[in-house]
Amino acid sequence: GGRTPKLPAKAVAAVVGWYCATVLLITTNKFLMGTDFGLPVFLTFLHMLVSFLWCEFSANVGWSRRVPLKNWRDAGKVFALSQTLAVSVALAVASFKYVEVSLEQALAASTPAFTAAGGVLILGKQERSKVWLTLVPVMGGAMLAAGGEPKFHALGVCLVFASNVARGVKSCLQELLLNKEAGLDSMSLLRWMSLFSMLTLLPMSCVLERPGVILEKLAFVWSDRRTFALLAANCGGAFLVNLTQFAVTSEVGALSMQVLGNVKNVFTTIVSVFVFRNPISAQGVLGYTITTAGAFAFGREKQKERAAAALAAEHATGGFVK
């Protein structure tokens, strides 16, 4: 009974799918923001609209089932989840006025710490001190990779950290809603979350980005075949990122999902170096090496926890493991 349980194939497939979908989303995002379509909040609204429509289509053709929300408490949790998404996007977008994207990415690497704290407060989880220690290289390495930023702005940094808190809370709420009690699967949670998100994102977009400007940009997209194809690929990528992210959270939990998110940043950076010929510094390579080593140490600690839990379950059931 001392075998270390390996991650299930389903979890590995979810992580691989998440990483690939993120590459599609980030590369199309970069191309889109380079065109005349510079509407981040409205783009997030489109992501949610496409996700909702796909979930509806999937349910209609019998690929997935529509799971209703059991009670008002669950509805409140899903609404809170949708709003933490909208808030984290809006804050991250607002921070770009004051800080560079690379600094935003570096500071965003602190999200696992907020997720661990959220896990204690929201999920009642107690992480062992060794787990907290492994988060230091995970976050420190990512910060080092995007470090040496000359453009430091106090308000911008505060906005990024506020966005990180929202992202950490979102991960914990996802884990809470994907457990057996709520009875929601990844597709059902995405359906409800995208529906509730749209209620806030559309008015937010109209206030921040102006309806006249939005219509003008949409007319441009409609007339330009290349931008239209980019936008379609981008929205498809966003749907896949959300769906696979829920699947990853369901398989490995909120904190592991955020640590895998930092490793994902390393992966997307490597891809962007090849796709966009982005220069990468020695400091960047060192930082990402530290992050990857930290994530590996975190994985080892979590694997030990799974082994201990499996052993405890085996003893509790007299040697029978479900």
Image (cartoon, rainbow, N blue to C red):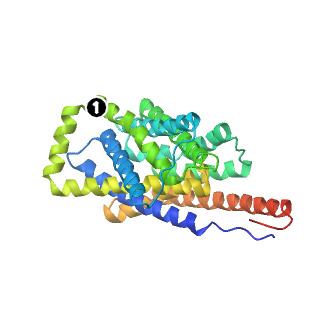
Q: Pinpoint residue 160: horizontal percent, then vertical percent.
A: 46, 37
Where, by quadrant of the figure, is residue 227 drawn? bottom left
Q: Is 59 left, or right, of 39 in this rendering?
A: right
Q: What is the three-letter code of the residue carrying label 1?
A: Cys
**Which residue is located at x 57 percent, y 63 percent?**
11
Q: Pinpoint residue 186: horizontal percent, then vertical percent.
A: 51, 53
Can residue 89 be seen from the camera position used here? no
Quick one: 289 or 14, which is closer to the camera? 14
Q: Pinpoint residue 174: horizontal percent, then vertical percent.
A: 55, 46
The N terminus lies in quadrant: bottom right
Considering every residue shown, the one lying at the far left of the view is 223
Where, by quadrant of the figure, is residue 219 drawn? top left
Q: Is 109 left, or right, of 225 in this rendering?
A: right
The residue identified by callout 1 is 206
**Which residue is located at x 81 percent, y 64 percent?**
314
Q: Element under label 1?
A: helix
Q: Is residue 117 above or below residue 224?
A: above
Quick one: 262 or 42, which is closer to the camera? 42
**Which residue is located at x 33 percent, y 52 percent?**
235
The C terminus lies in quadrant: bottom right
Where, by quadrant of the figure, is residue 85 drawn? top left
Q: Is 99 left, or right, of 166 in this rendering?
A: left
Quick one: 256 or 181, which is closer to the camera? 181
